[in-house]
Image: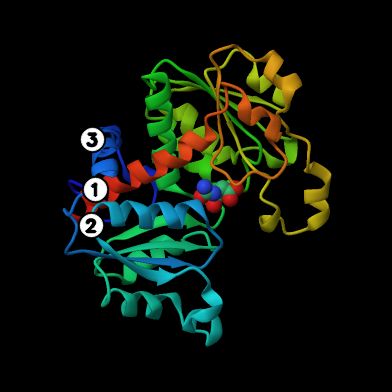
């Protein structure tokens, strides 16, 4: 990817890098269906120290569609890191001898950066603690562009758990590179970190903070809903105080503009009523497929 070897943070990419990834992703739409052999000499290792369905399987699907090979683990309990106390550094120094690229998800902030320090092969961050999830942000941007035909000029609201949700951290920073208006909607204890809001404003985009779903869904182009990250709360009572507060159901749909699109990185718990799935606003299962397309582009750009 030009000067880029690793994909650790969305901040490592400038707007040209992001546009290159999105344009390459468009070209992958046909390849995803036809399949290709362009990465047939490459091996991808997926090291998932934390639960995943879409991220890991879409990376594997992306690699397989490009003719590459995959190996890895989805459950740390079966590994030396989980069972015998091996360090992340030693795991990386081992796996780099088995593969050409490492895709890593880990519960600690900074984990992907640490992995990159010890690795001689490219590292792709597939979720580092509550901090970042850059490939999700890229597939979110790709989804917005594919559905709306553009990113510049849009008003986008990021809703739900903006404190612990890593997808909204990466997406907020990625959107800041475009000419957009952003609305941040969260229950007060789950507001976006002030440092990220400050960074968005410094770059010059308009950011509004609200604390209700109703305010966030009126007159916007995209509503990006997220799950309250139960597993990241230090105290379960804090979770109980906010759970179920942010929800989209039929009443909320009635408040929306007809052309408003609802996205969600998934998994959802209760924040989008399944009744919404049948409405023309719901695009989150289309977004899932865009994960394969975007990750094909990322793998191709990093490995070729
Ligand atoms: C997200 C994650 O793992 O951060 N899932 C995903 O990768 N699509 C969102 C979440 O877990 O809520």
Say whether residue 5 is visible: yes
CA–CA distance between discs 2 and 3? Answer: 16 Å
**Residue extending furthest bottom?**
84
Q: Secondary structure at mark 2?
A: loop
* Foreground pick, 180 / 124: 124
- Side of 125 relative to 211 (left or right): left
| Residue 238 % position (x, y) | 80, 50
| Residue 162 % position (x, y) | 62, 40
Mark closest to the chain's N terminus, 2 or 1 = 1
CA–CA distance between discs 3 and 1? Answer: 12 Å
Report the residue marked by disc 2.
67
Q: Secondary structure at mark 1?
A: loop
Residue neighbourhood size for the residue with mark 1, other residues' Cα within 10 Å, grouped as few (<14), some (14–19), many (≥20): some
Q: Which mark is residue 27?
A: 3
CA–CA distance between discs 2 and 1? Answer: 7 Å
Is label 2 or label 3 in front? 2
**Residue extending furthest front?**
34
Q: Secondary structure at mark 3?
A: helix
* Foreground pick, 14 / 269: 269
CB under 8 Å between discs 2 and 3: no
Report the residue marked by disc 1.
35
| Residue 116 % position (x, y) | 33, 64
CB under 8 Å between discs 2 and 1: yes
Mark closest to the chain's N terminus, 3 or 1 = 3
| Residue 283 % position (x, y) | 52, 30
């Amino acid at each position: 990817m030009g000067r880029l070897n690793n994909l650790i943070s969305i901040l490592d990419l400038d707007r040209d890098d992001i546009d290159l990834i999105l344009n390459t992703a468009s070209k992958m739409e046909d390849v995803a269906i036809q399949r290709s052999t362009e990465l047939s000499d490459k091996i991808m290792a997926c090291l998932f120290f934390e639960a995943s369905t879409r991220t890991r399987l879409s990376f594997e699907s992306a690699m397989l569609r490009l003719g590459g090979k995959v190996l890895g683990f989805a459950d740390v309990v079966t590994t030396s890191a989980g069972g015998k106390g091996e360090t992340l550094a030693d795991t990386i120094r081992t796996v780099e001898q088995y593969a050409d690229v490492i895709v890593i998800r880990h519960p600690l902030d900074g984990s992907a950066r640490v992995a990159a320090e010890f690795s001689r092969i490219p590292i792709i961050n597939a979720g580092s603690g509550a901090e970042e999830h850059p490939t999700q942000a890229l597939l979110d941007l790709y989804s917005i562009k594919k559905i709306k035909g553009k990113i510049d000029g849009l008003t986008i609201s990021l809703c739900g758990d903006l404190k612990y949700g890593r997808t909204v951290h990466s997406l907020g920073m990625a959107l800041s590179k475009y000419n957009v208006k952003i609305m941040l909607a969260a229950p007060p204890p789950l507001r976006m970190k002030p440092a990220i809001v400050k960074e968005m404003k410094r770059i010059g985009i308009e950011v509004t903070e609200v604390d209700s779903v109703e305010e966030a869904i009126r007159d916007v182009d995209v509503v990006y809903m997220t799950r309250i990250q139960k597993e990241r709360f230090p105290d379960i009572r804090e979770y109980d105080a906010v759970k179920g507060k942010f929800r989209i159901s039929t009443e909320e749909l009635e408040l929306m503009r007809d052309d408003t699109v609802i996205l969600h990185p998934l998994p959802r718990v209760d924040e989008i009523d399944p009744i919404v799935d049948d409405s023309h606003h719901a695009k989150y299962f289309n977004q899932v497929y865009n994960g394969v397309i975007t990750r094909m582009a990322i793998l191709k750009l990093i490995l070729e």
